[in-house]
Image: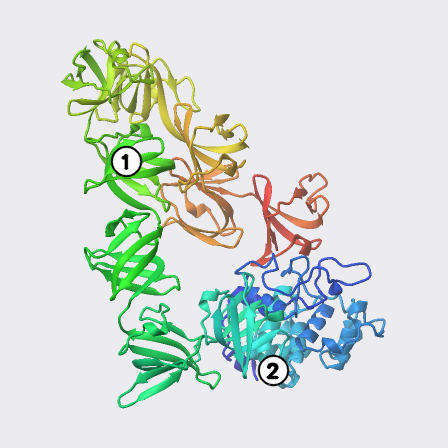
Amino acid sequence: MSAQKRSSRPMKAYSTKAISAVLAGAMVLGGASSAFAATVAASTPAAVTTSTTTAATGIFSDVKTGFWAEKHIYKLASQGIVVGNNGLFRPGDSVTQQEAVLMALRFMKLQGKVDIDTAVALPASFEVSNYYKAYVVLAFQQGLLDKTTEMASDNLKTAWGERKATREWIAEVLICALGKTSDAAAVASEPTGFADDSKVSASKRGYINTAVDLGLANGIAGNRFDPQGVVTRAQLATFFSRAEGHNTLDYDNTVKGSISEIKDGKLTVYNNGTTSPFNLSASTAYFNSTSETRISLNDIQPYTKVTVIGATYKAAYVEVTDPTPQVESVSGSFAKLSSGNKLWLESTDTFNEYYYDAATIFVDVNGVKIEPASIAAGSLVTLQRETYSGAHKVVKVQVTSGVVNKSSTGIIQSIDLTSKSITFKNAAGTVETFKWEEGTTLFSSQSTVLLPAELKVNSAVKYTIKDNMIRSVEVTQGVERTVLGTINELTGTTVVYKKADGTREVKLLGSAPTIVIPNISSPVAGDLIADAVGGDNVQLTLNSSDQVIKIEVLSRQIDQFIGATVVDYNSKTQLLTITDSSGKPHVVQLDVNSKLVYDGLPTTSLTNMGVRLVENRKVDVISIGQRALSVELSTKYVGTLTAVNTATKMIVLKPNNGQTITLPYPLSIDFFGRSNMAVTDISVGSSVTAVLTGNQDVISVLRVKSVQQLEVTSVNSTLNKLGVKWSGGSTELYTLTIPLTNEAGQAIKLSDLKAGDFVNVDFDGSSAVSIQAVKVSSGQVVSVDSTAGNLSVKDFKGVTQNFAVSGGVRIIRDTVTTTTLSSLTTADRVDMRKGADGITLIRVLPQLNRTFSRYDTATNEFLVKRDSLNDENYRFLLTSNVYIHQGDTTLSVQSLKENDKITMYFNNDVIVEIVKQ
């Protein structure tokens, strides 16, 4: 076959990652040995380490879900062909020739022919470790190795057994293990069609051609085969796993057949008249024969063809080999059931009899399980009968048309208020839709009657269907839902509100409900107005426990006067006359229910309050009509700075009620992180709190509200102190009374923060009001679209996230700052966060290129070779989560060899990633 002809053969398309997996290595021993054990005893090779090897799925901590060779590693591990050591597989480690031979013999199921206790003599020049000698001799006897080639003098310049197995050598071993040497001989003279064909050894060309023809091997980037490239354990595992499809051997603990049942954590396989039940567990791995990606148990259907691997009937590995159910369908009109588990279907001119048993599933039109006796005569049904055993057993009976009467549980998937229908996903995972009728359907949650519009998608429910119509829906575990009403009463633990129909409801308050009031920044529960007649119109958000977690004021029925001036107070009539900021007069009447505050403290004494309501006193009044809900002596104004008059030295404030107040310059200014400020340094439009002096005419302190992003330096949960720093200094915040949330607004504890984190802190002057953790994303830049403002970053767990950069960007590389994404490259490692001002902050992590020296397990130190005698930056402590890899292959630190070229990336002087070149 010419090179042109060979290159024209259909080639399977592989990704670069998959290509590199083709010629490659796996762990070579199962059972009581591991050729790749991490620790080699003085007298026994790693191949016979027994203490920590287990051939089971999910045991390799360095083979993460989604790893490209995961399927093949776990398949061979489940068969006992490969194992790990100390819970590690070390997929990136290279494979020696003697280890590969042992792997091939296990693949051929010949390892049992070796008596390792019998002395074996090999030529002194043919160096093989003692443990492997008997296996190598067997390999020569079985034709797996060619004695003339392997023992040639020019092939023995280095120790044969410890030599790293190359890609072309592994190709020969595998083709010989498959017994296809004649195929290789037939194409031995033909070029491989790869760009580096000239580097392929003449004696290996036929084996490479055959491996390619069988779909076991392919090239790497640039249409190269890299014949002298070394093979890793992950690659070799993939190689032999795929090769299993080309032999007829029955491997240990492996059963092939059709699934007869999946139930109660068990999977039963039927094959040639025998059923094999396997127990399933959380560690069972599921795959499809046509994909490298792991699937879930839910993706596996009864009556499909599978291969199940697992010792003592504990399924470690399940692979779907044909997803088509092995069933046939029979339809007809249900006639009746009779004794002996007989089911009768009526056809055109006769009745047909079918047998069912306890394992037969009966379901309604929506796939929900029903009792056989509940099927009404005349209902149309479809019977499914299995075709794999020859018995044609009825496995499922489904009603395709009939009357539904049942009770079930599930979740609400969708609600259509127009068509009056609800789509449920029941406990079995079946989706079904039913309608309701006004006046005959009851909707409820914890004994509270609901309106259909108050139901929420994803709520867990119990529902009853009668004559195909919804009769009741009870929310058993809700998601967040909202209700509308008017606040009548509000305590520290409950809220009483009146609904639109006039009924009153009482709800418990959550631990820290969010309060939202238009035009009031950072409102608290005390800012809400509760009144039997004129309370706030609100929307309450309830969590799944029916507790109020958010109160949003939609509208108010009140008049509010901030900084009003007292004209007169009549203690007998309790009438208070005031003028607002525009000089307009108003009269309100106090009563025993009015909230009264002076000197910052509440009082219930109208007499004590009355003596303070003297002419020209400033007060804050909230009223409904002429009834005063609250009267408070003005101590501060909260609002917006709208103007600064440098000529008159007056400022204008706009409180939250929309009025305007003009006052002299403040005596002092409080702004976090800044000192010696002038009024003119404050931007017009800033949110401020003006704290008044005792005579109420002068601002003693003008507190400027701000949001600052700070870096955490220390956390003291015992003393409730949080150390922070910024470019201008550092301080400690006392957090006992300050709400702390994560980036999603959910409450967190102080101990959830750590040094190096960033937080956004809301300040009223220099007093912290709230603290929110800032999400930081780190990883390698995958792609950059500076025009669209999009950035993709792959984190150190291999997960890629896409970010839309809006509101501006600031990129910091060493000491240089740029403002365009185009300055980033796909070689950069970055961490990203949103600044308090909405700008995306991207910091490029520093890197260091070095040559690896050694790893000190005792001190956990990672040592590199010095660049010069004066280089003192060569010792580094490793953290447990440092990401070490070569390409997409995760490596252990122990797999690095002296003189390996590496690149290290640092975050705050800590190594976060090591890349082997």
Seen from the viewer's position, the closer of residues 36 and 412 is 412
- The reply to whether residue 753 is in sight is yes
Q: Real-space Cα distance between discs 2 and 1? A: 75 Å
Indicate the quadrant containing the N terminus: top left, top right, bottom left or bottom right. Answer: bottom right
- Which numbered disc, 2 or 1, marks the residue closer to the eye? 1
Seen from the viewer's position, the closer of residues 183 and 438 is 438
Name the residue that disc number 2 marks: 248
In this rendering, the answer to whether 673 lies above or below 860 is: above
Seen from the viewer's position, the closer of residues 862 and 60 is 60
Query: Quadrant location of residue 611?
Result: top left
Secondary structure of the residue carrying tag 1 is strand
In this rendering, the answer to whether 74 lies above or below 869 is: below
Q: Amino acid at mark 2?
A: Thr
Tell me the number on the disc at residue 277: none
Query: Quadrant location of residue 346?
Result: bottom left
Query: Quadrant location of residue 548?
Result: top left
Q: Position of residue 174 (x, y in %)?
A: 65, 76
Q: Pointer 2: residues within 10 angstroms few (<14), some, or many (20+)?
A: few
Q: Position of residue 70 (x, y in %)?
A: 56, 64
Colour scheme of the rendered structure? rainbow
Name the residue that disc number 1 marks: 496
Which mark sits nearer the N-terminus, 2 or 1? Answer: 2
Q: Position of residue 825 (x, y in %)?
A: 48, 50
In this rendering, the answer to whether 159 lies above or below 562 is: below
- The reply to whether residue 202 is in sight is no
Secondary structure of the residue carrying tag 2 is loop
Q: Amino acid at mark 1?
A: Val
Indicate the quadrant containing the C terminus: top left, top right, bottom left or bottom right. Answer: bottom right
Would you say 213 lies left or right of 760 here?
Answer: right
